[in-house]
Amino acid sequence: MEFDSNKPIYIQIADNICDRILKGEFKSGDRIPSVREWGTGIGVNPNTVARSYEILTDKGVIYNQRGIGFFVAAQATDLILSEQRKLFIDNELPAFIKRAELLGINIKNYIS
């Protein structure tokens, strides 16, 4: 995993896990690698991974079964899609529309 220096690593790890869930690499009920496994695998401090897992747990994307590990929640895909769609609409879409208008692209011509 390559890291972007403009974004905290723990956020990038959480985003990577969400992307893997959306791609179907991790499915509902699947156990995800432990904090130590994940940290060792990508070369970061386990505390950084633990922070990522805490964020995802707070959002309801994953849950912890004490002594067993972390698992993908049943509603994980829906939660991630909902959040990602909102972020896209709030942050990326306005810039896209502005750029299209600047370039003289009428988006209505491309929507069926």
Image (cartoon, rainbow, N blue to C red):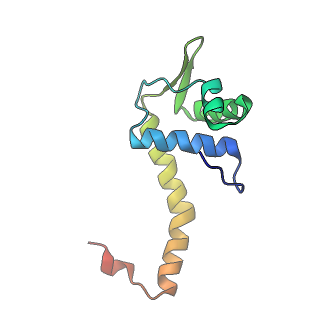
Query: Taking 84 as reference, is 74 left or right?
Result: left
The image quadrant of residue 41 is top right
- Give the image quarter of residue 29: top left
With respect to residue 110, does 90 lie above or below?
above
On screen, residue 33 above or below 98? above
Task: Indicate the position of residue 82 as horizontal and vertical percent values.
Answer: 47, 47
Q: Residue at x 53, y 70 (%)?
A: 94
Tally the numbered discs: 0
Q: Is residue 54 left or right of residue 102?
A: right
Residue at the left extreme of this rendering: 112
Residue depicted at 70% across the width and 36% down the height: 44
Q: Residue 9 occupies which quadrant of the picture? A: top right
Q: Quadrant of the C terminus?
A: bottom left
Q: Residue at x 45, y 88 (%)?
A: 104
- Considering every residue shown, the one lying at the far top of the view is 67
> In which quadrant of the rendered image does the N terminus lie?
top right
Camera-side residue of 10 and 112? 10
- Foreground residue, 25 or 92? 25
Front in this rendered view, residue 87 or 24 = 24
Q: Is residue 44 above or below residue 63?
A: below
**Residue at 52% from the left image edge and 33% from the top image edge:** 61
Query: Residue 103's spot in the image, x, y percent?
Result: 48, 87
Query: Relative to residue 61, is residue 25 drawn left or right?
Result: left
Residue 45 position, x and y percent, is: 73, 32
